[in-house]
Amino acid sequence: MTMPLAGFEGWVGGVDEAGRGPLAGPVVAACVILDPARPIAGLADSKTLSAVRRTELADRIRADALAWAVAEASVEEIDALNIFRATLLAMQRAVLGLQLQPQAILVDGTHCPQVSCRATAVVKGDATVPSISAASILAKTVRDDMLRQLHGRFPQYGFDRHKGYPTAEHLDALRQYGATEVHRRSFAPVRAVLIGASSF
């Protein structure tokens, strides 16, 4: 795993998000400043790890990182701003939530949130930059926990299994039960339910 830190000095935070594609629940972002003296083995894109391994690594990240923070943008903010802008807002909140403010951040993808420090986008950074991998793991584990909690309120939707993504099971539940307060009304399948369309 490589870390493109040439030209960076001081604390550098990695930033990533989880939950851009789902039809329900918030989008969650994390920022992590790793401790060079306490490297964490096995960091990788959270999507390539098992749930058990993600949880193990999330515990290590919380224990061994110099600083970390997790933040979200709500369903209401997603619908008001759009998912792209809401994701950047969640990322900005995560950076601002750090106990140590970084001199720079490296952000997975092609866009960066508006922050006071230097920000660099890294395509596929969750697979190549350890601090971004760590952020992806924290963001996903926190969001998955949120969706398991939503399952307790809305068990008929299967949030504990698909985590809000538009699986066949989720779309069938939307058709049968309609949309809840935690569904993103600006997303096409949810909007179709709200206007009574049957083909989606």
Image (spheres, rainbow, N blue to C red):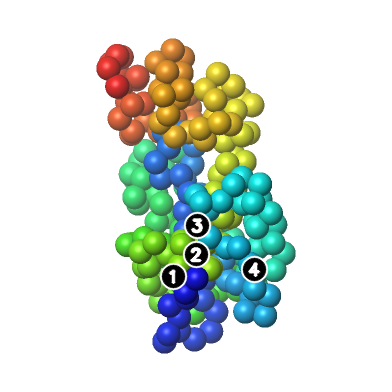
The residue pinned by badge 3 equals 45
The residue pinned by badge 2 equals 132
Query: What is the x, y in percent for residue 160?
Result: 58, 31
Q: Amino acid at mark 4?
A: Ile
Residue 67's disc number: none
Q: Are marks 2 and 1 in contact (CB under 8 Å)?
A: yes
The residue pinned by badge 4 equals 40
Is residue 36 visible in the rendered structure shown here?
yes
Q: Residues within 10 Å of mark 2 (few under 14, many from 20)?
A: many
Query: What is the x, y in percent for residue 147?
Result: 57, 36
Relative to 178, 66 lies left or right: right
Q: How far is the residue under mark 4 from the one under mark 1? A: 18 Å
For this rendering, which residue is in front, 194 or 126? Answer: 126
The residue pinned by badge 1 equals 106
Is residue 178 visible in the rendered structure shown here?
no
Element on which disc 1 rests: strand
Which residue lies at the image location 64% right of the left edge and 26% below the top edge? 152
